[in-house]
Image (cartoon, helix red, strand yellow):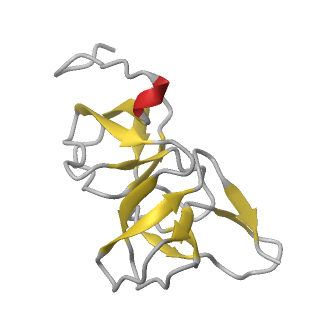
Amino acid sequence: MALQGQPRTILPASAGKRSVYNNSSSAIGANLCVMDDTTKDHVKLPTSASVPIVGVTGPEGIAAHSWGSVINVAGAKVPITNASGVTIGTRLGVDTAGKVVTIGSSAGTNYSLVGVADETAADGEAGEVTFAGPGAMIQAA
């Protein structure tokens, strides 16, 4: 299957970004978490709270059927939109809209670990998060 639109951009690892393709008919908004889709270099919004998160969109998001980039370096400080208000120092997971939420607490359940909140932010705000890195997971005690 040939891809439409601009060609894939190869970014050096030092750039802290990964070039990705949104094959969806919907845009992926700014400052949201994404997971890998089934095709190499394709991403989509998370399908559950336990899928590996591979990066965070920048302020431009990724248009439908387009190439874009995600920040994917562990330790990077990135703005991520939150779903229900977060408190500084809280471990953050993800919802199916790509927004961060306070990590779940069901004992023995695996959750995506997106990172740690670097500031308190209200519902719908993009707050600064220290990104845990691609694929980070945590199990609730």
* Horizontal and vertical percent position of residue 138: 73, 63
Q: Residue at x 74, y 81 (%)?
A: 106
Count of residue discs: 0
84 is higher (above) or lower (below) than 138: below
Q: Is residue 51 visible?
A: yes
Q: Nearer the viewer, residue 42 or 71?
A: 71
Q: Quadrant of residue 25?
A: top left
35 is higher (above) or lower (below) than 141: above
Q: Is residue 40 visible?
A: no
* Horizontal and vertical percent position of residue 102: 55, 79
Q: Quadrant of residue 29?
A: bottom left
Q: Quadrant of the N terminus?
A: top left
* Horizontal and vertical percent position of residue 72: 48, 42
Q: Quadrant of the C terminus?
A: bottom right
Q: Is residue 108 left or right of residue 68?
A: right
Q: Is residue 90 left or right of residue 36?
A: right
Q: Nearer the viewer, residue 60 or 111?
A: 60
Q: Nearer the viewer, residue 96 or 81?
A: 81
Q: Quadrant of residue 4?
A: top left
102 is higher (above) or lower (below) than 53: below
Q: Residue at x 30, y 19 (%)?
A: 8
Q: Residue at x 46, y 65 (%)?
A: 129
130 is higher (above) or lower (below) than 23: below
Q: Residue at x 44, y 36 (%)?
A: 16
